[in-house]
Image: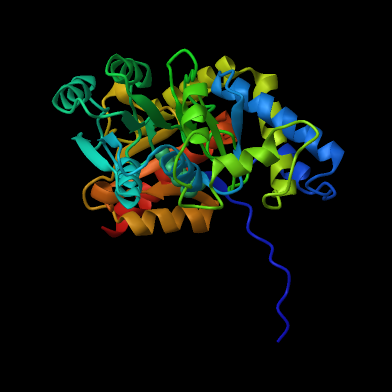
């Protein structure tokens, strides 16, 4: 038997990521591969850097994309900044906050956990109390947009509190970047990471990150080597910066970076604030359609993420059967519940290119059919 070429089906991706990729981004991927030190490519990388500065709303020099998915961006922020002597306050209200704790523990640093409720925003008052009770703390970490539950936390206020206690801030913006308001400089975020495949609607496998000057200073002045050679930013920056002295660290994923560049050009052309407004508008349309179908949201209205809509699965409806029906009959992917919500929730993504009228119409009519079918056989 000879194995043939792989042709994936044409799905509509409305889960927690990856999201639908724009045809323009897909065609950028297919452009000819050049060397990762080719002068034209190096010029494009500089553009990626300034487009990311725009997307993050930052002037941070230390802004680039890690050659690996969002989880690597998370790990890069933690292993570069934190040493075993540090105390990190981690706010947890879902799966991704738990992963932050895991990162801190593996470094051997002290962790103070601010335990929140799954499906609710991080409580600023709880962070304040934790910091008052732990004056030795020097970092605060939290997830801006908790994709596991569809919750948006008030990053601006949380960072303000962290700063009042002289802490550096580490923020997960994997799902928030490009989808909701995010202002790295105004909000005083010191280290932030995102992912290419959520609201940027690029292919998976890249993680935009940015470090404030203060964070960059810490990385530069470390006494001990970063435990991960690949993620060591003092080495990686030699490749991403330094006009004329760009040096080899690893082979950049050249074509994936064309794709990221294209997705950021699309974001720039639309305008960041317009993209935020589009996600909100599409969310409102989807939400009203979902409530007509009798589906209720997990998250209170003012804490909802427009780009990730988590709804309760109605009693007696088989989670797996409905999602299989959507995939088989409509080529439509929605997300399952995670962690505490496994089997109890669906997560409907409206991320980037997927935040469109066409997707909402398809999702609502397919779900209506799926629920009818599920109830017939219940
Ligand atoms: C998806 C996601 C991640 C992990 O990103 P990967 O690209 O899957 O590694 C981290 N944090 C949040 C909030 C996410 O939504």
Q: Quadrant of the C terminus?
A: bottom left
The percent position of residue 105, horizontal first and vertical second, equals 29, 49
The percent position of residue 303, horizontal first and vertical second, equals 31, 24
The percent position of residue 121, horizontal first and vertical second, equals 27, 27
**Viewer-closest of 49 and 217:** 217
Above or below residue 308? Residue 325 is below
Q: Is 120 displayed left or right of 224 in the figure?
A: left
Q: Quadrant of the N terminus?
A: bottom right
**Viewer-closest of 195 and 270:** 195
Residue 200 seen = yes
Q: What is the quadrant of residue 24 in the picture? A: top right
- Counting labels gives 0
The percent position of residue 179, horizontal first and vertical second, equals 50, 27
Q: Is 309 displayed left or right of 111 in the figure?
A: right
Above or below residue 72? Residue 303 is above
Residue 202 seen = no
Which residue extends farthest front? 223
């Amino acid at each position: 038997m000879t194995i043939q070429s792989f042709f994936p089906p044409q799905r509509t991706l409305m889960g927690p990521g990856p999201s639908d990729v724009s045809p323009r981004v897909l065609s950028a991927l297919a452009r000819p591969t050049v060397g990762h030190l080719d002068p034209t490519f190096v010029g494009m990388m500089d553009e990626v850097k300034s487009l990311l500065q725009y997307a993050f709303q930052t002037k941070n020099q230390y802004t680039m994309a890690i050659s690996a998915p969002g989880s690597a961006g998370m790990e890069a922020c933690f292993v570069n900044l934190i040493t075993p002597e540090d105390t990190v306050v981690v706010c947890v209200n879902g799966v991704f906050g738990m992963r932050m704790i895991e990162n801190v523990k593996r470094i051997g640093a002290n962790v103070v956990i601010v335990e929140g409720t799954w499906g609710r925003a991080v409580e600023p008052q709880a962070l304040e109390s934790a910091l008052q009770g732990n004056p030795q703390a020097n970092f605060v970490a939290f997830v801006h947009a908790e994709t596991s539950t569809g919750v948006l936390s008030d990053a601006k206020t949380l960072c303000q509190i962290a700063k009042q206690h002289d802490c550096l801030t580490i923020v997960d913006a994997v799902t928030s970047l490009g989808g909701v308001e995010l202002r790295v400089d105004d909000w005083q975020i010191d280290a932030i990471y995102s992912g290419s495949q959520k609201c940027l609607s690029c292919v998976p496998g890249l993680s935009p990150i940015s470090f404030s000057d203060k964070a960059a200073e810490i990385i530069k002045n470390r006494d001990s080597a970063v435990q991960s050679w690949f993620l060591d930013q003092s080495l990686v920056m030699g490749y991403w910066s330094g006009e004329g002295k760009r040096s080899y660290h690893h082979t950049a994923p050249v074509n994936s970076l064309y794709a990221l560049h294209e997705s950021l050009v699309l974001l720039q052309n639309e305008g960041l604030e317009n993209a935020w407004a589009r996600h909100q508008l599409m969310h409102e349309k989807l939400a009203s359609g979902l409530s007509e179908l009798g589906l209720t949201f997990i998250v209170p209205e003012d804490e909802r993420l427009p780009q990730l809509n988590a709804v309760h699965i109605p009693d007696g409806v088989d989670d797996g059967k409905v999602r299989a029906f959507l995939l088989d009959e409509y080529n439509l992917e929605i997300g399952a519940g995670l962690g505490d919500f496994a089997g109890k929730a669906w997560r409907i993504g409206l991320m980037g290119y997927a935040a469109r009228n066409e997707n909402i119409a398809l999702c609502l009519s397919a779900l209506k059919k799926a629920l009818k079918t599920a109830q017939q056989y219940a």
